[in-house]
Image (cartoon, rainbow, N blue to C red):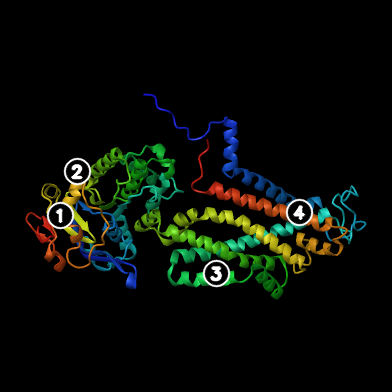
């Protein structure tokens, strides 16, 4: 007997299906975000080659508009510094702070979250309260206080931002580890006599990490924003050009020479956007329920 | 015959203070070498807790669990590790019981590493041998759990349990998540392996039909207590406890008026009395104890 076939979805051309899969599965945002971010990283890494001089040096007439001079396509500041050089060297500072701060936050969060989630009991109770304590403080204020106490070097700033960011990671890791601790494959490992280290590192963490990895790019983006905020307030490292300090310096001439604030602003926006795209893409791609390719 | 596992008056409870709830309430049973003991009961009766307690995943509240005459609570360090090698468990949910990020090969290899098999080649030989025994083609070894069928996954679960050469395997509903045709395959595999390797099983299920196929002796649990135990033939031919009869009728496909789980079992007297068609005054007053009615057939019913 002929039965009507149940169409689960409209059948399109393989190319269209492929594109739809690409879009839905998160690979699109991952590729676009990743490409933009990679370009920024490469530019920052090549700063010494592209602009060998000190970006704080006065090189020509101040306040050249973008396009006014072929040698300085993005114009110059009120002190006659090359804006293009500032942007590229600023990328270096922003990325260094972003990555270092994310690493600090990730490390602290991973250790604290794993301890709290796996051990439970009083260790969990104490750590949860410490996390809550950190979360009651506005992270930016915390960073400002720490930087004000210590010297405003890149390292201090990164540490401070990492200290402000670890509770997010810790909470996420704790929740993951807590639920995985009761997973049957972990119970199976326990009753086969696996050691605690092997259970945590080999069984629990590999399964807890995907959402954490997606969070890391947001962590980097937040750190870049915070560093920009600090530098804007003149609390950044005074020896280094960063996007935030460029915007801060542009305040005086904002009405007339607004490009001085807009260009580094665009750079920050582009970097943060690319990182958020990477995070969104990773969330989709690493999710256990991800679809198989058509 | 040597007694492998002896459980004596086991009590297990979950929760603390006023939320404390007794799950196992004085369970005693033994498993001899080479024997398959079946444990049946409905969901929530404590049979999975029994399995977890034996392998050390749930805390013993009272009574004792002895393996070859040694109380497992006195084990520590190397002797506890040895116990973890000798007593293995096969889980109900084959997908949840396998690490999703590990290949079959890695899943089978890790227990060997943990228990001190240093030589990579002999590990590989052992894994291929076990895969062969449980009916997994070598090509499957590089797959991850979600790339396998339910039956194949359960074969991996059984392989993992057998790879350390255990003596006792606790099977917690190993086939209840599988299709009926696959159930038969896995049950056949389990009984073949028992014959080949001289294993003992503690086989836990809610399905009398499945337990009868594999078990030598059967214990029926209701609300944390053993209410009947007998040779599998005796139990099938002559079930004494009303609850066992109900299970039997259910496994023969007869409809029963009973809706499991609805009234919570009373804590005093016979725990089954609210659902028992034959309950009378004495059932509420006195807790029936297991009484021998001949040939090792024991039942806990005032009418038995």
Question: In screen coordinates, is A79 left or right of B183?
Answer: right
Nearer to me, A276 or B272? B272
Which label sits on residue A13? none
Name the residue nearer the viewer: B272 or A278.
B272
The answer to whether residue B117 is seen in the rendering is no
Question: Are marks 4 and 1 in one subunit?
Answer: no
- Alpha-carbon span between mark 1 and mark 2: 15 Å
Chain bearing tag 3 is A
Tell me the crowding category of disc 4: few under 14, some 14 to 19, or many 20 or more residues within 10 angstroms, Cα based. few
How far apart marks 1 and 3 lie (CA) works out to 56 Å
Give the chain of mark 4.
A
Residue in the foreground of this view, choosing between B199 and B262: B262
Mark nearest the camera among 1 and 3 is: 1
Q: Position of residue B127 (x, y in %)?
A: 36, 44
Q: Mark 3: which secondary structure?
A: helix
Q: CA distance from mark 3 to mark 4?
A: 34 Å
Dot label at residue A131: 3
How far apart in space, not on screen, are marks 2 and 3 (Cα)? Answer: 57 Å
Residue topped by disc 2: B252
Q: Find residue B276 and report its horizontal and vertical position in percent.
A: 17, 57
**Is A88 displayed left or right of B14 in the figure?**
right
Dot 3, crowdedness within 10 Å: few (<14), some or many (≥20)? some
Q: Earlier in the sequence, mark 1 or mark 2?
A: 1
């Amino acid at each position: 007997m002929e039965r009507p076939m149940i169409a689960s979805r409209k059948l399109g051309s393989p190319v269209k299906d492929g594109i739809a899969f690409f879009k839905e599965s998160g690979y699109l945002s991952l590729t676009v975000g990743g490409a933009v971010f990679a370009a920024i990283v490469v530019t920052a890494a090549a700063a010494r080659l592209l602009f060998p001089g000190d970006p704080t040096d006065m090189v020509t007439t101040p306040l050249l508009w973008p396009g006014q001079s072929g040698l300085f396509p993005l114009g110059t500041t009120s002190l006659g510094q090359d804006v293009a050089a500032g942007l590229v060297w600023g990328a270096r500072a922003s990325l260094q702070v972003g990555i270092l701060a994310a690493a600090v936050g990730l490390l602290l969060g991973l250790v604290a979250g794993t301890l709290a989630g796996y051990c439970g009991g009083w260790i969990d109770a104490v750590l949860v309260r410490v996390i809550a304590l950190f979360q009651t403080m506005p992270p930016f204020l915390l960073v400002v206080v720490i930087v004000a106490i210590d010297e405003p070097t890149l390292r201090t700033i990164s540490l401070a931002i990492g200290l402000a960011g670890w509770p997010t990671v810790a909470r996420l890791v704790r929740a993951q580890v807590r639920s995985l601790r009761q997973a049957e494959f972990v119970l199976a490992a326990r009753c086969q006599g696996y050691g605690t280290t092997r259970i945590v590192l080999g069984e629990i963490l590999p399964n807890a990490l995907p959402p954490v990895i997606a969070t890391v790019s947001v962590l980097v983006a937040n750190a870049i924003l915070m560093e920009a905020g600090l530098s804007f307030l003149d609390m950044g490292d005074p020896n280094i050009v960063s996007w935030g300090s460029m915007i801060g310096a542009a305040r005086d001439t904002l009405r007339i020479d607004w490009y001085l604030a807009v260009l580094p602003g665009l750079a920050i926006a582009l970097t943060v956007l690319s990182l958020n795209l990477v995070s969104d893409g990773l969330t989709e791609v690493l999710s256990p329920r991800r679809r198989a390719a058509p | 015959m040597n007694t492998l596992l002896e459980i004596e008056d086991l009590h297990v409870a979950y929760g603390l203070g006023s939320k404390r709830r007794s799950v196992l309430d004085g369970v005693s049973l033994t498993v001899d070498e080479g024997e398959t003991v079946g444990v049946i009961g409905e969901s929530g009766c404590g049979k999975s807790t029994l399995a977890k307690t034996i392998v050390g995943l749930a805390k013993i509240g009272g009574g004792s669990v002895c393996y070859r005459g040694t109380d497992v609570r006195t084990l520590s360090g190397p002797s506890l590790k040895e116990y973890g090698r000798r007593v293995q468990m096969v889980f109900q949910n084959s997908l949840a019981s396998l690490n999703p990020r590990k290949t079959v090969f890695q899943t089978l290899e890790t227990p060997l590493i943990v228990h001190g098999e240093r030589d990579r080649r002999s590990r590989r030989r052992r894994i291929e041998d076990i895969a062969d025994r449980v009916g997994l083609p070598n090509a499957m070894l590089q797959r991850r759990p979600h790339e396998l069928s339910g039956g194949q996954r359960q074969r991996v679960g059984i392989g993992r349990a057998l790879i350390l050469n255990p003596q006792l395997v606790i099977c917690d509903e190993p086939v209840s998540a599988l299709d009926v045709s696959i159930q038969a395959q896995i049950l056949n595999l389990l009984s073949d392996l028992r014959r080949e390797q001289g294993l003992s099983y503690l086989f836990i299920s809610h399905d009398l039909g499945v337990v009868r196929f594999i078990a030598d002796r059967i214990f029926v649990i209701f609300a944390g207590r053993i209410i009947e135990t007998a040779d599998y033939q005796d139990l099938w031919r002559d079930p004494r406890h009303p609850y066992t009869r109900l299970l039997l009728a259910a496994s023969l496909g007869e409809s029963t008026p009973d809706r499991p789980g609805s009234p919570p079992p009373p804590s005093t007297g016979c725990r089954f009395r609210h659902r028992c068609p034959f309950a009378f005054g004495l059932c509420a007053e006195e807790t029936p104890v297991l009484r021998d009615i001949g040939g090792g057939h024991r039942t806990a019913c005032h009418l038995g």
